[in-house]
Amino acid sequence: MQSDAFHLGPLADPGECHGPIDLAGTPASTARAWLRKLIEIRCAEEKIGDEFGRAVIKCPCHLVIGQEAPAVGVAAHIRDGDRVFGAHRSHAHFLALGGSLHHLLAEVLGKDTGCSRGMGGSMHLLDRAHNFHGSVPIVGATVPIATGAALAAKMDGNGAVAVSYLGDGATEEGVFHESLNFASVFKLPVLYVVENNLFSSHLHISLRQPFDSECRHAEAHGVAWQRVDGNDTVAMAAAAGRAIAAARAGQGPQLIEAVTYRWRGHVGHREDNDVGVQRKEGLAEWKKRDPVARLAAAMVAAGQMAETGVAAITVEYRAAVEAAWVQACADPYPSAAALIERVYSTGRAS
Ligand SMILES: Cc1ncc(C[n+]2csc(CCOP(=O)(O)OP(=O)(O)O)c2C)c(N)n1
Ligand SMILES: [Mg+2]
């Protein structure tokens, strides 16, 4: 076993990895598309945070501010027929694949126009038209579903892949290990993206696991793995490109560990609080690893964008988010009848 399968090293050190990233020959148009998507997600999340703070949004929201890059890097390689699954912190996964701001905001407001008809909220996102086949709040629960989707893709021989996003906390669920074992034995075309933000709720990884890197689980199950600076969109896209190409080519399951950090508390809008526990970590240092700023700095240095580029794109997306918000606020709630439309019943009275 590779000993570096156990340790994150500098990637877990908030004093490291602050500089501009390496564009690695990324064309200006591609870098710009990724930057725009990062900023769209950031603006949407800030709005959701603001409205959650004002108690206008009432469902629990797990914000992804600071860890937008994995979703954007992976989405760059998803094509129609692939099946992507998220978890409780999936606004970015949904938006990166092309999900609509309006459908997301309407969902967190409980409106009929939401992506789950307003009946799921932030943790039940769905957008099959953009290959996003669902997110659920039960930690680890979508890992076996994605594995099953990969089995279906293999049986259909259609060249599709499945993607499972999960957190470092979800690797503590037994079904994660069962899924990796199964996928490895059957050489399934599945990519597990572990967004290791070092925390599960208020608990740092050092209090929960003997080692801080989740790659050891891939190694143990014979799954190919890569570890990436999860705040570097270019590196994320490159790793996802390699992994997804290998999975499509029949080389079996892949795992990417994206090391990142969330700026807001576990749930809700506050920066200083994880479910009632005061945060102690060096958030100011982690903010220097901002995926938006680092991609933008590299683009400016390469002459791909003016210094004012981020500000201009941010103005544009704040307006788009605001327009979608106004529309969602004006939308109706589901009718009372709609509440039981999808309820399964045998018809027998108990
Ligand atoms: C099976 C299960 N156990 C516990 C919870 C409560 N819970 C919700 S999110 C969460 C933390 C998960 O951490 P991680 O997987 O690292 O994701 P992150 O929140 O860091 O994105 C926990 C414990 C749950 N929803 N489901
Ligand atoms: Mg986590």
Image (spheres, grey):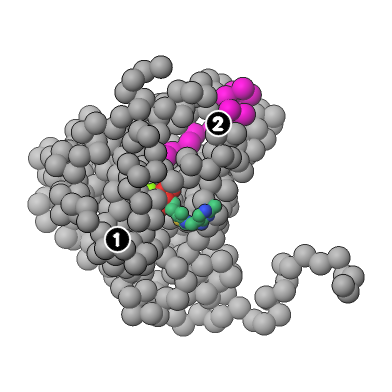
Q: Is residue 34 left or right of residue 127?
A: left
Residue beneath disc 1 = 264
Question: Which part of the image, by quadrant, shows the C terminus?
Answer: bottom right
* Residue 152 spot, x, y in % from top left: 67, 35
Q: Quadrant of residue 243?
A: top left
Q: Is residue 255 above or below residue 128?
A: above
Residue 204 visible, this angle: yes
Question: Which part of the image, by quadrant, shows the N terminus?
Answer: top left
Residue 162 visible, this angle: no
Residue kind at label 2, given as amino acid type: Leu
- Residue at the location (25% across, 39% down)? 12
Among all residues in the image, which is located at the extreme top? 1
Residue 241 or 68: which is nearer the viewer?
68
Residue 240 or 208: which is nearer the viewer?
208
Question: Would you call the spot at circle 1 few (<14 residues within 10 Å), some (14-19), or many (20 or more)?
Answer: many
The mark nearer the N terminus, 1 or 2, is 2
Q: Is residue 20 above or below residue 128?
A: above
Q: Secondary structure at mark 1?
A: loop
Q: Is residue 172 above or below residue 246?
A: below
- Residue at the location (24% across, 36% down)? 11
* Residue 255 spot, x, y in % from top left: 45, 31
Find the magenta span and give its range: 181-195
- The numbered mark at residue 180 is 2
Question: Would you call the spot at circle 2 few (<14 residues within 10 Å), some (14-19), or many (20 or more)?
Answer: many
Q: Is residue 319 left or right of residue 177?
A: left
